[in-house]
Image (cartoon, rainbow, N blue to C red):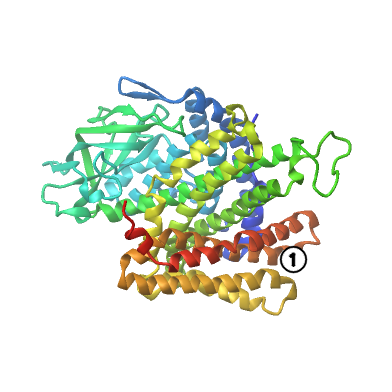
């Protein structure tokens, strides 16, 4: 019953028009990713997601994973789908050629990840984590470890996962108890239990490479004493390591993705990076994972939106308030009703702007790793640092919201499993929690990103946004977009200044407004995106009037109906924390 069609036209708009990739042809690796190649990759990715992954999504949700004597069996069809994924070269195309990768830019990988998350989120968790493990090992692993493990992670023959959480600690990783004991051969024995390990055990790959946080015997207290270790399920000589799955969690959603309890019983492991340097190395993987989790929210929002639009055009109920819209039918399609249109436009305004921000962040990652100019690389890193908590938190909040709106559009049928949208709501909910809860992302934004080097990160947004307003100041056609952008940029500056000042006086005031500040920041970022899209649409609307007029209409809706939410958010932020902290609970 549910439907999914990869939004190829939208990807092409973002890559070719919004990001203007032709400007970067001199950057190493970009010329190989020609428009023809980009189109071919998008088309083949769409085919794989629509024809292979999407038909397995509901079946996988209904069947779930099977735990049998320490092993985990994925739902029917998933292992074969993973083999096709590997044979298609999808794990390797954004990886280093020195280890078997294709060396293509990350922005193409981001498009593929979104399509996979829309088609079958449970499937996409394993390759997404593997790519994060690849990034961590590439940046922090020794040459020996990279040579031994990266080639098969790159091909997808082996997968990679994170081992952070323990029964007594989640966010506060300084409380971990897993121990690492040095051995004479340079390895370590790892002993401890990790929980909530996504894809910690499964039957799609021959080996699973665990990146595990543990403490050495001489470790100082807290997070300063954490080290990172590579612990394979199967050792290079083919013998089984002391890595065992003692069970899987029974969850609200993502039923086809195993969430495991993993016991390390004097397992053999190797140090990544330096002793007590585990947090820095792990954050490489976590920051990558947070971006991908944000795209999970976007991917589910996209497929939920598609189903809501299809249903709203087919379902007839009542008549339009201004008169009969479809006299050939006994009632009008529900898409004529204002509240249904509000919900549909909210979905559309989010997904299209979110896609632009996700792809831009991936592009910045490519430029950070490839651009010859040090200043450009630094600016790109600052942009990524600023946007990571926004992508992770706002995208996943909205992924859940859009999935729930899709259920609402479907009415009673949205609550019925046959129509599929209730699964999107269940699957989306976890993304607000794992890889750092959204409240933690908000604290990261106000505690680390906002004050960093007297606002250096913030300049990566505020300066281009103000320059855009100034550039279009004298264009009357752009006034309906630039005026609200300029006004709400001012509100965001007020909130930033207030939090910066109050945080020094009373940290609770800053923390108490952190969630509202992150959402406010996201709304103004989206306003900038929609204003830029409007400028492109005005310039090109004669080429494809229907497409570009739809862009302008969505931009107007965002400016008129969603962006004003910053006013109440600003009020809530500046009301401080007394009503929170002085309440008797």
Residue 489 found in image quarter:
bottom right
The residue at 77%/61% (across/down) is 541
Q: Is residue 105 visible?
A: no
Q: In front here: 191 or 558? A: 558
The residue at 31%/66% (across/down) is 507
Residue 46 found in image quarter:
top right
Horizontal side of 337 relative to 91 (left or right) equals right
Can you name the residue that lies furthest to the right here?
A: 328
The residue at 43%/37% (across/down) is 126
Horizontal side of 482 relative to 77 (left or right) equals right
Can you say which quadrant of the picture contains the N terminus? top right
Q: Which residue is mark 1?
A: 538
What is the number of callouts on the image?
1
Q: In front here: 163 or 560? A: 560
Q: x, y percentage for residue 578?
A: 35, 64
Q: In front here: 98 or 60? A: 60
Horizontal side of 135 relative to 522 (left or right) equals left
How crowded is the residue under tag 1: few (<14 C-alpha within 10 Å), some, or many (20+)? Answer: some
Q: x, y percentage for residue 517?
A: 46, 63
Q: Work out whether 566 lies above or below 421.
A: below
Question: Quick one: SS at disc 1?
Answer: helix
Q: In front here: 174 or 77? A: 174
Q: x, y percentage for residue 409?
A: 65, 40
Q: x, y percentage for residue 490?
A: 54, 74
The residue at 39%/40% (across/down) is 153
Horizontal side of 435 relative to 184 (left or right) equals right
Can you name the residue that lies furthest to the top here?
A: 69
Q: Work out whether 4 lies above or below 23.
A: above
């Amino acid at each position: 019953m549910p439907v999914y069609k990869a939004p190829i036209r939208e990807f092409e708009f973002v890559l070719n028009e919004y990001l203007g990739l032709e400007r970067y042809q001199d950057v190493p690796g970009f010329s190989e990713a020609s428009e023809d190649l980009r189109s071919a990759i998008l088309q083949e990715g769409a085919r794989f997601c629509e024809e292979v992954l999407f038909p397995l999504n509901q079946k996988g949700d209904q069947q779930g994973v099977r735990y049998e004597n320490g092993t985990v069996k994925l739902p029917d069809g998933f292992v074969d789908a993973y083999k096709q994924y590997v044979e298609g070269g999808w794990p390797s195309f954004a990886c280093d050629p020195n280890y078997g990768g294709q060396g293509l830019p990350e922005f193409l990988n981001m498009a593929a990840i979104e399509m996979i998350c829309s088609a079958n989120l449970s499937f996409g968790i394993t390759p997404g984590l593997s790519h994060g493990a690849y990034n961590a090992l590439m940046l922090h692993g020794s040459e020996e470890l990279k040579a031994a493990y990266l080639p098969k992670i790159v091909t997808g023959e082996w997968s990679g996962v994170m081992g952070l959480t323990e029964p007594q600690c989640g966010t506060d990783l300084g409380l971990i108890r897993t121990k690492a004991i040095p051995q004479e051969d340079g390895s370590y024995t790892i002993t401890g239990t990790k929980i909530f390990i996504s894809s910690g055990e499964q039957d799609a790959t021959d080996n699973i490479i665990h990146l595990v946080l543990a403490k050495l015997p001489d470790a100082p207290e807290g997070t300063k004493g954490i080290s990172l270790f590579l612990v394979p399920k199967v050792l290079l000589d083919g013998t089984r390591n002391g890595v065992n799955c003692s069970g899987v969690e029974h969850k609200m959603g993502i039923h086809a993705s195993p969430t495991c309890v993993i016991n390390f019983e004097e397992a053999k492991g190797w140090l990544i990076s330096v002793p007590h340097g585990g947090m820095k190395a792990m954050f490489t993987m976590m920051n990558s994972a947070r971006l991908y989790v944000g795209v999970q929210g976007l991917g589910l929002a996209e497929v939920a939106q598609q189903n809501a639009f299809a249903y709203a055009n087919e379902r007839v109920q009542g008549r339009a308030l201004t008169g009969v819209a479809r006299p050939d039918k006994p009632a009008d399609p529900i898409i004529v009703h204002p509240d249904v249109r509000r919900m549909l436009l909210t979905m559309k305004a989010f997904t299209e702007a979110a896609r632009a921000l996700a792809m831009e962040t991936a592009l910045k990652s490519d430029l950070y790793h490839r651009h010859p100019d040090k200043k450009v690389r630094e600016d790109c890193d600052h942009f990524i640092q600023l946007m990571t908590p926004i992508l992770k938190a706002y995208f996943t909040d909205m992924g859940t919201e859009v999935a729930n709106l899709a259920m609402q559009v479907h009415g009673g049928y949205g609550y019925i499993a046959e129509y599929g949208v209730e699964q999107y709501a269940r699957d989306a909910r976890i993304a607000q929690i794992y890889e750092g809860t959204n409240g933690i992302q908000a604290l990261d934004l106000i505690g680390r990103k906002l004050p960093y080097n007297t606002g250096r990160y913030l300049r990566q947004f505020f300066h281009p946004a103000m320059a855009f307003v100034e550039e279009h100041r004298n264009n009357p056609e752009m006034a309906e977009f630039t005026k609200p952008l300029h006004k709400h940029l001012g509100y965001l500056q007020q909130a930033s200044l207030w939090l910066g000042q109050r945080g020094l006086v009373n940290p609770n005031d800053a923390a108490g407004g952190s969630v509202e500040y992150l959402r406010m920041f996201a709304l103004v970022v989206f306003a900038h995106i929609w204003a830029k899209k409007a400028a492109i649409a005005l310039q090109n609307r004669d080429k494809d009037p229907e497409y570009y007029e739809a862009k302008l209409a969505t931009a107007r809706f965002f400016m008129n109906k969603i962006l004003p939410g910053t006013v109440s958010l600003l009020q809530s932020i500046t009301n401080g924390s007394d009503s929170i902290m002085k309440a008797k609970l």
